[in-house]
Image (tube, helix red, strand yellow):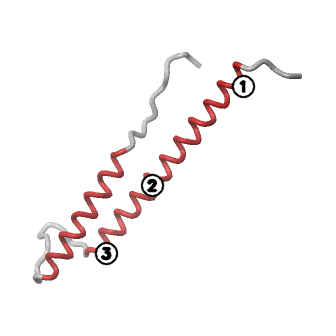
C-alpha cells in the first residue's frame, strides 16, 4: 500500500440530491393531481416517485455507513501500527 490516499468511488451527495429532487417532483405531481393534471412525460404516480426517493436514501445511508466503518478500520490499523506490541 502506498502512502498516497486513495479516494473512494462514492462521492456523497449524488444520491442524496437525487432523492430530494425526486421528493420535490413527487410533491409537484401530488399538487398537479389536485388540479386533475400531471407532468406530461412522467407516467408514475406520486407514491411511486416517493418510493424511488426512499430507495435512494436507504442506499445513501448504507454507502455512508460503509465509508465510516472503513475509515474507523483504517484508523485502528494505523494506531496499531504505530504502537509497539505489548507482548
The mark found on residue 47 in the picture is 3
Residue at the image position 35 percent from the left and 45 percent from the top: 13
In the rendered image, the quadrant that contains the N terminus is top right
Q: Does 78 appear above or below 55?
A: above
Gap between marks 3 and 1, in whole Å?
Answer: 49 Å
Residue at figure coordinates x 89%, y 22% from the top left: 87
Q: Is residue 87 left or right of residue 80?
A: right
Pick the front one: 83 or 10? 83
Residue marked by disc 1: 80
Q: Looking at the image, tell me whether mark 3 or mark 1 is earlier in sequence order.
A: 3
- Distance from label 3 to label 2 (Cα)? 18 Å
Query: x, y (%) of residue 84?
Result: 78, 18
Binning the other alpha carbons within 10 Å of mark 2 as few (below 14), some (14 to 19) or many (20 upward) gives: some
In the rendered view, does 79 fall on the left or right side of 37?
right
Q: What x and y, as percent, mark residue 71?
A: 56, 35
What whole-number distance in Å separates the C-alpha atoms at marks 1 and 2? 32 Å
SS state under label 1:
helix
Residue sitting at 54 percent across and 41 percent down? 68
Residue 36, compared with residue 7, is above or below; it is: below
Residue 41 sits in which quadrant? bottom left
> Is label 2 in a helix, a strand or a loop?
helix
Q: Earlier in the sequence, mark 3 or mark 2?
A: 3
Of badges 1 and 2, nearer the viewer stands: 1
Q: Badge 2 is on which residue?
A: 59
In the depicted structure, whether residue 2 falls above or below residue 30: above
Amino acid at each position: 500500500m502506498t502512502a498516497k490516499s486513495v479516494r473512494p468511488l462514492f462521492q456523497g451527495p449524488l444520491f442524496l440530491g437525487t432523492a430530494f429532487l425526486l421528493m420535490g417532483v413527487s410533491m409537484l405531481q401530488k399538487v398537479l393531481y389536485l388540479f386533475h393534471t400531471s407532468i406530461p412525460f412522467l407516467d408514475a404516480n406520486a407514491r411511486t416517485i416517493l418510493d424511488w426517493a426512499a430507495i435512494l436514501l436507504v442506499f445513501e445511508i448504507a454507502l455512508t455507513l460503509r465509508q465510516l466503518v472503513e475509515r474507523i478500520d483504517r484508523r485502528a490499523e494505523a494506531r496499531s501500527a504505530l504502537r509497539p506490541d505489548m507482548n
